[in-house]
Image (cartoon, rainbow, N blue to C red):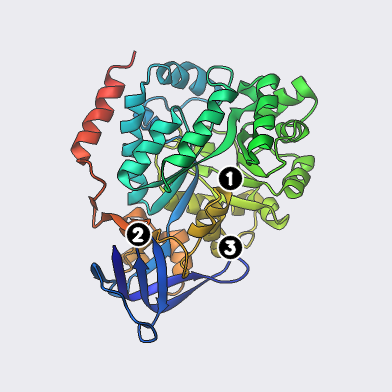
Amino acid sequence: MNTRFYHAKILMLAENHKFEVTEGELWVEGDTIRYIGDGTDAAPPAWDREIDAEGNLLIPGFKNAHTHTGMTFLRSYADDLPLHEWLHQQVFPREGQLTEDDVYWLNILGIMEYLTSGITSNFDMYFFPPVNAKASADTGFRTVQTSGLNNFGGTVELMEENYHIVNELSDLTSFIVGFHAEYTTSKELMEGVAKLAQKLKSPVWVHNSETKIEVDECKERWGMTPTQLTDSLGMYEYGGGGYHCVWVEEPDFEIFKKRGLTAVTNPASNLKLASGICPVKRFVDEGIAMAIGTDGPASNNCLDMFREMFLTSTLAKVREMDAECVGADEILYMATAGGAHAMQLSDCDSLAVGKKADIVMIDLKQPNMQPENNLVKNLVYSGSKQNVKLTMVNGKVLYENQDFDIGFDPAEIYARANAIIGRMK
């Protein structure tokens, strides 16, 4: 599929996590961006489709760097509870009733919501990774997965099996070693994860320092923070990172720097579960890579990167009582390139020749996008999923003007999701 975008504003990644806007054309051949310019200095291929952007903005797709997509069935089901009560009394008992077929359909529901928010890839942790991968491949969406291994389910051997199945299934699906969290996982299992990561030369990802009680209890058990413990077990020989990273302590920052780890902040979920506010400014000041995730639809409950960008920025400012502490360009970088690098999707991080065609068109002809004083700040501070006009993944338009082209009838997906939660005890 060869696609020509013309009369477009194009958001380009510049130096030092800054962005600049150019005007012209962007050409897609197959799954790859082949040209960006004014359209006069290159010979165009035969077009399958030509899209007049009408002055609207093309941006790289957002990367949802931490989520549990299959938890769509628990959206607005188990709210207004602290994390541990929410997990053990509401979430885990119902997740235990899920079948592989359930998770397939629930993933498609989540993928639909990602597309409406301009999200072109997600970093997922959930049950049945081959099933999740199939949902992505079948819809044309891009998904990176890690394991949620813990004491209640899974084995290191199964993780290794899933690693190979998912990485070989499709060019849209990949898998990275990981486990749920220190507080749900025995030391023996964690040691097994570290050995597997070393064997496969894989990064390791884990929920890390999400709540104060998590860190306090880890220190009681091991005399170390979760970051120190996992590092001491040899987890990060090939990098990786942590989700949430709210209650990190001084030694943890040094480990993140030394190991080249990424911190993924999930502000809406952390607010809703009263977990705390991530020290975003400190991570940025230390030169530690950051990305942004929604977390799952049971704890957020919305899979909306615009909301996450706004919260990441404004919570950092109020935490430090410093309105200048983290700028809009840095936030947008986290939501796009930062997430791509965390997910090992270096060919999906920006709009540039040779990169994958994971592209979002933003409708600038809406009140919240006018005037066009600064388009990056408009995206971060006033942008909304209502501005997502088109979402392309791997060179295929999957969502356009509120219609989906993913091979499934939305009404069927909604009916299946309601039936799944309807039978839960």
Q: Looking at the image, do the residues carrying marks 2 and 1 touch, with CB atoms under 8 Å apart?
A: no
User: 90 or 258, which lies in front?
Assistant: 258
Quadrant occupied by the N terminus: bottom left
Residue 281 placement (x, y as % from top left): 66, 54
Query: For mark 1, what is the residue?
Result: 264
Residue 395 disc label: 2
Residue 125 x %, y %: 50, 34
> Residue 76's quadrant in the figure?
top left
Name the residue type under label 1.
Answer: Val
Q: Is residue 375 left or right of residue 48?
A: right
- Left of 208 or right of it: where is 73? left
Q: Nearer the viewer, residue 377 or 52?
A: 52
Identity of the amino acid at label 2?
A: Gly
Secondary structure at badge 1 equals: strand
- The residue positioned 45% from the left and 54% from the top of the image is 62
Mark seen at residue 211: none
Q: How far apart, in angstroms, are the residues tagged by discs 3 and 1?
A: 17 Å
- SS under mark 2: loop
* In this rendering, the label closer to the viewer, 3 or 1: 1
Report which quarter residue 378 is drawn in.
bottom left
Q: Is residue 355 left or right of residue 417?
A: right
Q: Earlier in the sequence, mark 3 or mark 1?
A: 1
Q: Is residue 181 above or below residue 45?
A: above
Determine the residue located farthest toward the bottom in the rendered image. Answer: 40
Please tell me which residue is depicted at 32% across the width and 26% down the height of the picture. Answer: 101
Within 10 Å of disc 3 (Cα), the crowding (few <14, some 14-19, many 20+) is some
For marks 2 and 1, give the CA distance: 27 Å
The residue that label 3 is drawn on is 327
Could you tell me if residue 67 is visible in this image? Answer: no
